[in-house]
Amino acid sequence: MRIAIFSDIHGNSIALDAVLADIQTRGGVDEYWILGDLVAIGHDPLGVLERLSKLPNAHLIRGNTDRYVTSDDQPPQEWVNEVKKDTSQLPQLITVTRSMTWTRGAVSVAGWFDWLAALPLDRRFTLPNGTRVLCVHASPGTDEGRGMNPWMTDDELWELLKECDADLVFVGHTHQAQDRTVNGVRLINPSSVSNPIAPDLRAGYVLLTADEKGYRLEQRRVDYDHESVVEAIQKIKHPAAELVTQHLRGQQLPRL
């Protein structure tokens, strides 16, 4: 079996199209595991949802921004508390909050609200060789927080992994590719379809090939036309246009 795993699309249908096209050039897959943060921030949330809904054997979970869009949990209190300590973050907080509201309106009018709100926190699978897999957005048990970053120590990661009850964990959220093994648990982050951290702004995903003998992973990076995304988001006067444009040009990472 072959599975494509990706995360953090953030409403960027142009980047998603590039990833889906690359998957086909690699021979296609049997399933898709999609790790959340599907629509918020970007220019085309509806296009992303339409594409994802047509994928065969797609298994999706929610990310923190999917929850923000479909609930009253935004802006997140953690970020509000930080802004109280450092008011320089206030403009970005306002921009992101306005973007969430814009996205909520789009998915509501188009009839996607309930579908998005019903996404689960995590999903579990078992590979043909018995490997137990957990898919989650940020870390086991939560879709938000600091996530599982490459700069964290093994001890810090183990505090988040020790009760995961899995051999292989796929996470997103940090927008940084990662492949670590801690106390026998392998942690994989496929990077981000949209908004990976500079300098490598290519869309990222992982190909998993599995059979009764074991599994193999391949980290993939795919280039796409970033300026087309800039033009699209500016044309519609998106509330986060400036923020997203800066990042797509390698100047700044949106706080997500």
Image: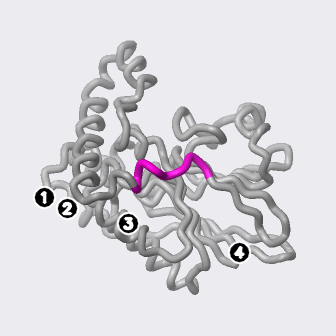
Q: Determine whether 7 is above or below 66 in the image.
A: below
Give the numbered dot on residue 235. Answer: 1
Q: Quadrant of the N terminus?
A: bottom right
* Left or right relative to 146: residue 98: left
Q: Say if 92 sits above or below 62 in the image.
A: above
Q: According to the image, label 2 marks what residue?
A: 232
User: Which residue extends farthest top?
Assistant: 85
Foreground of the two, 40 or 182: 40
Amino acid carrying mark 1 in the image: Lys
Residue at label 3?
15
SS for dot 3: helix
> What whole-number distance in Å separates the C-alpha atoms at marks 1 and 2?
5 Å
Q: Earlier in the sequence, mark 4 or mark 3?
A: 3
Q: Which mark is residue 209?
A: 4
Q: Is residue 185 magenta?
A: no
Which residue is at a point 42% across and 23% down the rendered structure image? 77
Between marks 2 and 4, how big is the CA–CA gap?
35 Å
